[in-house]
Image (cartoon, helix red, strand yellow):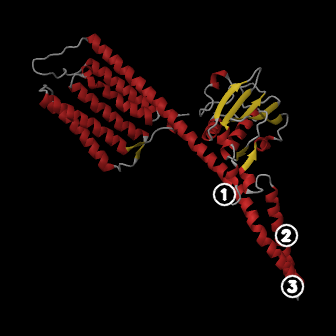
Amino acid sequence: MSGGSLHGRIRVSTIVTMRWIILGGQALILALSVFGLKIHAPTIACLVGILVGTLANVLTVLSSPRSRIAGPRESAGHLAFDLLQISYMLYLTGGLENPFVVLLIAPVAMAAARLPRLQVLTLGATAAGMILVLALTRLPLPTAPGLAIHLPDGYLLGVAAATLSGLFVVGGYVRHAATDAARMGLALDVTQMVLAREQRLSALGALAAAAAHELGTPLATIAIVAKEMAREATTPAAREDAELLVAQAARCREILRRLTDAPDAASDEVHERMSLLQLLNEVLEPHASVKGIRIEAIVTGAPDVTAPDISRRPEILHALTSFVENAVDFAGSEILVSARFDADSVTVEVRDDGPGFASDILAKLGEPYVTSRAGIPGGRTGHVGMGLGFFIAKTLLERTHAQVSFSNSKPRGAVISARWVRDLIEASASEFQPGLVP
């Protein structure tokens, strides 16, 4: 993924605010040095540097709304100006002998966080060039009367090396953190979209059940009245209209009957509550017609422990379906989806007999943009994933308080396991009492 797809958005207000902080700090240090510590410094030249920075900031505020987002080139131009202004002030006050040389890192760190790679490299090279220039030429470090400081060249070389190292280390660290945060943000946005879609589908099932229940009585009344009208009609046209009403009412009742006959929409209680076997069957249903793969669902439990009914959660259904889809993609000939329960926990496991997860990415699974099966060009469906589906599925399950793990089985195959504390996933009896909306 290119840097430009994740970066390049800096508000003008951020640029202006950071520059005011730098200029204010420079003015404060200059005032304390000259008037407080009585240090001899090129005051006029320093004031010119601060005035130029102030003028640039005022023009920026006047020429552009503070809420506007500057483009990559414009942002890089502002940060380059800050680098030059800081370098000018350092040149006047001792160059690398001035401990405030570390301020050169700030614009590069901002660029690393928000700008494309080209602008980051350009600003990094500019800052490195400024450091080397300051190592070679500078005005003497301002000191108090009677105090002279002469730092050896070897020490200044070490300062230059340390500053350059800090420049690249901090820039690289910020770049990596910002890129990772942007990817996580993108993946979480997709997760929210998936969850919203699953919740809408789940709500449609409950709505269909409610509609079937509520419309049954008025449709029956319409059918009875229409039959009476047909029987008492005095003209063929009136009888034909009444019979049409009877036929249409019967058609509506047939549609509602099909809705109520569906196992996932018979009633609110049935729709919102399911057994472990129903859960597994619903997860496997989209893949039941896959040829060449035997898919089996098994539910086992501890002796003398009643099997739990669980709440229908769109997060769980989508996540487990995604894991089964991945298993179908790479299984050799068999997929086993099992659910185990005891008095304390419920565990659902998806196991296939494929090549398993590559060892170098096994620990990274569940992060966005990690390929699910390295070394296999697309699996059965030809799809080459970037791990976003695994990230979404893992995130959705963790929202239901599940502990998700990925591993390989022996001698071969991948295993994905989700474990819940039983009390957190089990549907309580009081949750679906008649007259209550779950």
Residue 427, given in percent of the width and then of the height, sits at 69, 46
Asked if residue 146 lies left or right of residue 270, the reply is left
**Label 2: which residue?**
250
- Locate residue 339: give its quadrant: top right
**Label 3: which residue?**
237
Residue that appears at 19% across and 35% down: 48
Q: Is residue 267 above or below residue 296?
A: below
Q: Nearer the viewer, residue 312 or 33?
A: 312
- Give the residue at the far front of this rendering: 304
Counting residues from the start of the chain, the first of labels 3 and 2 encountered is 3
- Give the residue at the far left of this rendering: 146
Instruction: Say which amino acid is labelled 2.
Output: Ala
Q: Does residue 24 appear anywhere in the picture?
A: yes
Q: Nearer the viewer, residue 113 or 80?
A: 113
Q: Provide the secondary structure element on which disc 1 rests.
A: loop
Between marks 3 and 2, how big is the CA–CA gap? 20 Å
Between marks 1 and 2, how big is the CA–CA gap? 29 Å
**Label 1: which residue?**
437
Instruction: Say which amino acid is labelled 1.
Output: Val
